[in-house]
Image (cartoon, rainbow, N blue to C red):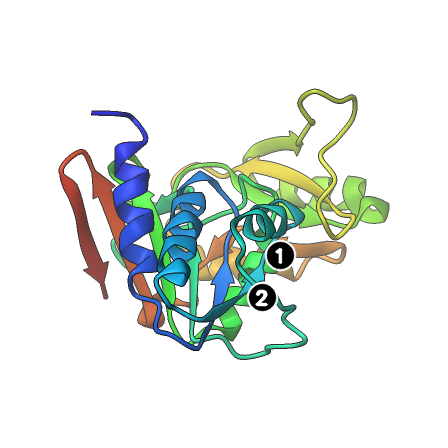
Amino acid sequence: MSDEAPKRFAGYAAADLVDSGMVVGLGTGSTVRYAMERLAERMRQGLTCVGVPTSHQTAMRARALGIPLASLNDAPRLGIAIDGADQVDPALRLIKGRGAALTREKCVAAAADRLVIVVDEGKLAERLAVQVPIEVLPFACATVTARLARMGGSGRVREGTAKDGPVVTDNGGLVIDWSFGPIDDPERLESEIERIPGVVTAGIFSGFGKKTTVIVGDDAGYRVLTR
């Protein structure tokens, strides 16, 4: 079985939750790509929907697949948002942002009636503990880093691949990846990070559990987690 099979199972299952006429938030990442492929297939069979992309990369993929797009300003309320995650805990709190689209992903998650997260088994954890991506204003990068250091842990500005210099988000921000170790209180940490002047978004998503469905793909299919 291909290593991609769990992602495909989860992505296809998420796309099958979309009803005709829905506005759909489209996250950023490899698992969401499969959801978009399935949406395009269903559209050829008669489904109608409009996507709100969370990144330039997602918008490019959607256009290539023939999925019509709108902005969040055009469609401020979404029926469903489909996205991935870096880690998920039993309360369905998330760490997100490896694709550097965390700010737009959090905006889309907040606007959606339902948030569907597609992951493989390796993304599930008893406690959130992976690096927390944090989008920051370039102007305040040094001061934010100093404040984070006083909070404990360590990290640095994310560097690009196949280019020199830091990763620059679609919003013109930089991303600091910070390791706090196991996180005892994700809600409190998310709030503390986002109160630092210069921080745009913390990659902890702790406030959406009640409307979150997690679809976990494996080699045999998928299972569904809700709170």
Q: Residue at x 38, y 40 (%)?
A: 182
Q: Quadrant of residue 158?
A: top right
In the picture, the quarter occupied by the C terminus is bottom left
Label number found at residue 16: none
Do residues under tags 2 and 1 come within 8 Å of each other at their CB atoms?
yes
Q: Looking at the picture, tell me which residue is in the foreground, 121 or 26.
A: 26
Mark 2 is surrounded, within 10 Å at the Cα level, by few (under 14), some (14 to 19) or many (20 or more) other residues, namely: some
- Residue at 17% x, 51% y is 223
Q: Identity of the amino acid at label 1?
A: Thr
Q: Position of residue 123 (x, y in %)?
A: 32, 40
Going by the numbered disc 2, the residue's amino acid type is Cys
Task: Please give the name of the residue rendered at 42% of the width and 58% of the height, measured from the top-left corner.
Answer: 82
From the viewer's side, name the closer residue of 222 and 43.
43
Q: Is residue 213 left or right of residue 218?
A: right
- Name the image quarter holding residue 93: bottom left
Task: Please indicate whether residue 110 sits to the left or right of residue 227 in the image.
Answer: right
Q: Which residue in the protein does label 1 denote?
A: 103
Q: CA distance from mark 2 to mark 1?
A: 6 Å
Q: Secondary structure under badge 1?
A: helix
Measuring from the top left, give residue 167's x and y in whole percent. 71, 34
Q: Is residue 210 visible?
A: yes
Dividing the picture into quadrants, the one containing residue 200 is bottom right
Q: Residue furthest front?
A: 45
